Amino acid sequence: MQITPGKATVFGKGSKTRVVIIPPRLWRQVVEFKQIDRASHWVFVTISGKQMERSIVHRMIKRTCQRSGVDERVSCHWLRHSHATHSLEAGCNLRLLQQSLGHASVTTTEKYLHISPDKGSSQYIDF
């Protein structure tokens, strides 16, 4: 992961590169954190200072859900799916979401589209 003010370049699944926009408040917190722990160039590290593996994050999510009484089926992928769904519901452009998720095809991203029976395209036309 490479971090610059306001964004992070993340190398993800399938060796795909994604740019993640970081809100200003979170950016300040990352900068403050890195001033405390300058030994590692990783943002998320283990107690020993090594890069945090995905399996550790997965276990942390499972454990937190269990303690909170949230459905144990929650996973990193479920959170990713929730992000995509909520972004689209809030008006995110499908092409932008495709880029953010790192999908090669917009067809993959379209799976996050859900048709609501109480909505129609006429809502977006100003009569």
Image (cartoon, rainbow, N blue to C red):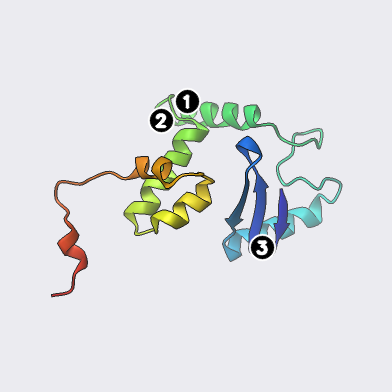
Q: Element at badge 3?
A: helix
Contact between marks 1 and 3 (CB within 8 A): the answer is: no
Label 3 packing within 10 angstroms: few (<14), some (14-19), many (20+) = some
Q: How far apart in space, not on screen, are marks 1 and 3 (Cα)? A: 31 Å
Query: Residue at the spot x=37%, y=46% of the render?
Result: 85
Q: Determine whether label 1 and label 2 are within 8 Å by CB.
A: yes
* Amino acid identity at mark 1: Gln
- Quadrant of residue 30 within the rendered picture: bottom right
Number of the front mark, 1 or 3: 3
Residue neighbourhood size for the residue with mark 1, other residues' Cα within 10 Å, grouped as few (<14), some (14–19), many (≥20): some
Q: Which residue is mark 2?
A: 70
Q: Earlier in the sequence, mark 3 or mark 2?
A: 3
Q: Is residue 6 rendered to the left or right of residue 2?
A: left
Pointer 1 or 3: first along the chain: 3
* Distance of label 1 from label 2 (alpha carbons): 6 Å
Residue 120 in the image, given as x and y percentages of width and height: 16, 56
Disc 3 target residue: 28
| SS under mark 1 | helix
User: In front: 110, or 83?
Assistant: 110
Q: Secondary structure at mark 2?
A: loop
- The residue carrying mark 1 is 66
